[in-house]
Amino acid sequence: YYDAFYYIYAEKNQDLDKRTSYKKRDSGRFNPMQLCISRRIFLPQDRNSIPFRSYETGLLQYGDANPDHEQYNSLTDFAFKNGNLEIRIPWQLLNIMDPSTKTAMADFYRNRGKRVEANFPLEETFMNFERDDGIKAQGIDGIHVGVAAVKQGEAHDALIGMGYYTWPTWTLPTYHERLKKSYDILQKTLSALNEKENSREKAK
């Protein structure tokens, strides 16, 4: 019911087949989270049609997020060790539009909530905001979160316990900078190119 990908590309833009069951609240159904790569495109000179393409962006990647470790992976989403689970909060997959103000997508089908102004040209949006048919926003206090571990190929029909999670709003997030490992490689390469260029100039 909260699948924004389906709502945008099936209900609003007819790129995908509509499925009535997806519009049923509290169905217990969880769709794989997809991201559109490209919509259908017709190339008139080639008389060739490129089909709609998407990929599953909701698959969280396991790994080590510690940059000091040998197995460090900057794309890591979660890690599990000694009974502890650490996870990066995938805000977009949770339909959170702006975590700094606790703003989430409102109910797509009831057309309630506050209008969100698009900060890019109307012709580039998936919705016509002048007709007020875009996805609207709502303020929230927090979210309920639950986790289940299921082996691949096995079924799981047990109830998942949900805990309440909230967070403080912010104006300026905390952050820290660090150099990527490729920085030293680029630095040496560019320095070598610069020295080579200087040698040519002197030779002239």
Image (cartoon, rainbow, N blue to C red):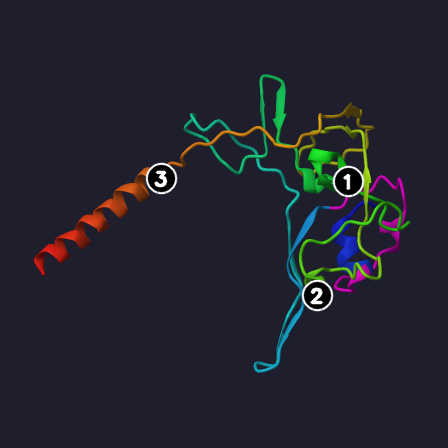
| Occupied quadrant, residue 118 | bottom right
| Occupied quadrant, residue 203 | bottom left
In this figure, which residue is indicated by the disc labeled 1? 104
**Is residue 17 visible to the viewer in this orientation of the structure?**
no
Q: Secondary structure at mark 2?
A: helix
Residue extent of the magenta highlight: 12-31
Residue 55 percent location from the top left of the image: 63, 52
Q: Secondary structure at mark 3?
A: helix
Around disc 2, counting alpha carbons within 10 Å, would you say few (fewer than 14), some (14 to 19), or many (20 or more)?
Answer: few
Q: Secondary structure at mark 1?
A: strand
Q: Answer above or below: position of 180 versus 195.
A: above
Residue 46 percent location from the top left of the image: 57, 81
Type of secondary structure dominating the magenta stretch: loop
Q: CA distance from mark 2 to mark 3?
A: 39 Å
In front here: 183 or 164? 183
In this figure, which residue is indicated by the disc labeled 3? 183
Q: CA distance from mark 1 to mark 2?
A: 24 Å
Which is more N-terminal, label 3 or label 2?
A: 2
Q: Can residue 14 be found in the magenta stretch?
A: yes
- Does residue 200 appear left or right of residue 7 in this picture? left
Residue 68 percent location from the top left of the image: 42, 25
Residue shown at the point (78%, 29%) measured from the top left: 142
Q: CA distance from mark 3 to mark 1?
A: 37 Å
Q: Answer above or below: position of 16 versus 25.
A: below
In this figure, which residue is indicated by the disc labeled 2? 123
In this figure, what is the number of numbered marks? 3
Pick the quarter of the image with the C terminus. Answer: bottom left
Which is more N-terminal, label 2 or label 1?
A: 1
Residue shown at the point (72%, 29%) measured from the top left: 148
Kindly identify the amino acid type of the residue bearing the numbered disc 2.
Glu
Q: Answer above or below: position of 120 versus 182.
A: below
